[in-house]
Amino acid sequence: MLRPKPKSIWLDHIVLASSNIEATVSEFHQLTGILPIFGGSHVGRGTCNYLTSLGTNSYLEIVGEDPNQIDTVTQMKAKGIPLSFGVDGLTSGQTRLAAWCCSTMNPSTFANLPEWAGKEFDMSRKTTTNDVLEWSLKIPGNGTTTEEDYFFDTINSGVFGVLPFFIHWKDVYQQELHPAQTSPIGIQLKSLCLEHGDGYDILVEELGRLELLSTDDGGGGGGGGDGIDMAPSLTVKYSNDDGLEKKGRMTALLETPNGMVVLNENGFSKVKIPTKM
């Protein structure tokens, strides 16, 4: 049985967007030693996912164009409707850490999230065992409940691209069907780091309001270069690196059977450990 964290909101999953999902899954397997399993198709939305557990309550979702929904993808592109997480805007062979998602089991908590969390809309998909997963989503920055809500752009969305989106699973925990439980184990999410320049104070304030932040880090709070810790293993840092003032960056560190692996806007790779002199 899953053991959700005592906090009312916790990290549910991180999303790796791929221009070629089958190739990405193969490369991820070779690098980490863990083969993600096919989760299912997002019917009518042109995408599918592969999943691997990242611990008791969280998982990695690899998202890409669904080879079994070619007609849907073609129709969406003809109408100018982008695919989820901008997967159709990636260059050939490109992968990127696109988003992170927080979950709550409390319907009231989900309903009363801050306004920036967006409007609620429902989704569902079948698993490979024909179970039906149902959930509600809220996407930061969305002000309507139209179909386009889920096709958000995390590349050019400012601080909204670094804030989490939110999920409320419907009976998934009770049925023991949460992807963290049904996906391959062996990888642990060690850390997720959020960096931003102009949006740093917003991140600290809003994530603090959701009680995701722990200021007991010795860093001194807002604006400090040491960052602010988020339980567990999550940090927010100020960065004035080129481009990060407006865009921001997410970096996840995974502990895998083949060593430490980093996920960011450049995809995923082994962590290089400096050679001792």
Image: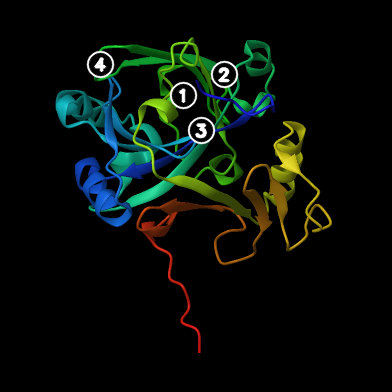
Direction from residue 75 to residue 273 in the image, left or right: right
Is residue 9 positioned above or below 274 on the image? above
- Residue 66: quarter of image: top left
**Identity of the amino acid at label 2?**
Lys
**Identity of the amino acid at label 1?**
Asp
Whole-number angstrom distance, CA of label 2 to CA of label 1: 8 Å
Name the residue nearer the viewer: 275 or 90: 275
| Disc 2: which residue | 119
Mark seen at residue 149: 1
Direction from residue 160 to residue 121 in the image, left or right: left
Q: Earlier in the sequence, mark 2 or mark 1?
A: 2
Count of all numbered marks drawn on residues in the image: 4
**Identity of the amino acid at label 4?**
Thr
Is residue 114 something that shows in the picture?
Answer: yes
Dot 1: element: helix
Q: Are marks 3 and 2 in contact (CB under 8 Å)?
A: no
Task: Mark 3 vs mark 2: give the one in front.
Answer: 3
Q: Earlier in the sequence, mark 3 or mark 1?
A: 3
Dot 2: element: loop
Name the residue nearer the viewer: 18 or 78: 18
| Disc 3: which residue | 56
Q: Are marks 2 and 1 in contact (CB under 8 Å)?
A: yes
Q: Earlier in the sequence, mark 4 or mark 2?
A: 2
Dot 4: element: loop
Query: What percent of the width, then of the height, locates residue 168?
Result: 54, 18
Task: Mark 3 vs mark 1: give the one in front.
Answer: 3
Crowd around label 3: few <14 · some 14–19 · many ≥20 (10 Å): some
